[in-house]
Amino acid sequence: MSLSRIAVAIVTSASLAVPACTAPAEAPGNTPAANTPAAESEVPSEPGRQLSALAPENITKARPAAPFDLTGNWFIDVTENPNAWRFGPPYPKLTAAAQVHFDASQVAAKEGKVYRDDIGQCWPAGLPLIMTRYWPMAMIQIPTAIYMVSGFMNSLRIVYLDGRSHTDPDIIVRTFNGESIGRWEGDTLVVDTLGFRSDHHWMDQGGASIPAGEQLHIVERIRLINDRKQLEIEYTMTDPEYWEGEWKSTKRFNRVNDEDIQEVSCLPDLNEHLQSTSSKTQVR
Amino acid sequence: MTKALLGGVLVVMLATLVPVFAHHSPAAFDRTKEVTLVGTVKEFRWQNPHTWIEVNVPDGKGKTVLWGVELTSPTYLVRAGWKSNTIKPGDKVTVIVNPVRTGEPAGIFRKLILADGRELTERPARLGTPDSK
């Protein structure tokens, strides 16, 4: 498809009704279609480039209806176990490279100290821990993607559902939440995530410090259960740099329908006033 | 349970453990110990992800020690009856905390007792229970 045809298609589809994802109505006489040459020049896409998950042409593309809609605020179910936010124990057999950190964190814990608590120093929690913080995760699902914004530091995670492949490893920008690609398998959404940043990124904290490496690969099998009132995610995680085989864990989340997430930032003045994050208990 | 009193600071050793939810590891706090601070509010900051109180506490030796008290987020505190103006600088308060293990004048919040005797905690404030609306 030529650039001009892409531009026309996007401009045309922008006028279609798209439930829950349409842009605010343009003022009369100020629609993109009223200024076609300018609109065409505004389309940055190059031939062969992936259409944005928010491009109307992508959103309105014919595709099977999603088996479920995750739109909502979800909170880790800790009603039975207040430590359910953790992904272990049990932990997999660690490599020597991970064991040194795990052991050091155990020693620190026995001394009442905190080993490399990077989250406490405002580094992003990253996947998987970002999913189970003690703040709700807002999820907004459209046909092409699920946008997740954590109530914890507003961390952004995008799960693409539009059939795209993972980004070329040579150009991917490594991040703490990685790049997530989802596909539907019956009533299950299978999400494949890689492209993680490894520095200051941990699989656990507080006496069980296990690093997350650049080879970290996470597969999530996501379902709605209990009459769609609960979200269940089965995690299968591998990272040959830091553990052997598959690390599995299943988490359940409950809806929070009477609270919205808020703007949250980890700012310098936060930790200046929380002496615990800078006290002598910190082991770097 | 054992008790020790130093100026405006009462230390109580507890036998129970209380979960602490914060953006950082809770290991810095000694949750077997409670410290009661009787002092004057210097600052009450109502913000995400944590609210904090700074309290000037007399040490019983003619000096004042500034204690930093860490609370959870306003989202939870509102559910427990707090408002942004629940306390303000200059208010006389009693604050009970689990202290940091190092002996530094800091802790994580357990209970506030206002001058009129009203008590506030961080709970009940659980989000996302199966009964959540």
Image (cartoon, coloured by chain):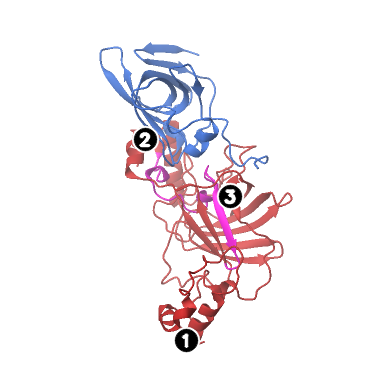
Chain colours: A red, B blue
Quadrant in the picture for the C terminus of chain A: top left
Q: Amino acid at mark 1?
A: Ser
Which disc is residue A73 wearing? 3
Q: Amino acid at mark 3?
A: Asn
Whether residue A72 can be seen here: yes
Q: Is residue A131 magenta?
A: yes
Mark 3, chain letter?
A: A
Q: Nearer the viewer, mark 2 or mark 3?
A: 3
Work out whether A52 lies above or below B15.
Answer: below
For marks 2 and 3, the one nearer the N-term is 3
Looking at the image, which residue is at 47% across and 76% down? A32
As drawn, which residue projects farthest toward the front? A28
Mark 1, chain letter?
A: A
Work out whether A264 lies above or below B5.
Answer: below
* Secondary structure found at label 1: helix
As drawn, which residue projects farthest toward the left? B62
Looking at the image, which residue is at 58% across and 45% down? A75
Q: Within the image, what quadrant is residue A12 found in?
A: bottom right
In the rendered view, does A280 fall on the left or right side of A157?
left
As drawn, which residue projects farthest toward the right? A227
Q: Whole-Å distance between the Cαs marked 2 and 3?
A: 28 Å
Residue designated by label 1? A4
In the rendered view, does A65 fall on the left or right side of B124?
right
Q: Within the image, what quadrant is residue A172 found in?
A: bottom left
Report whether mark 1 lies on the same chain as mark 2.
Answer: yes
Report whether mark 2 lies on the same chain as mark 3.
Answer: yes
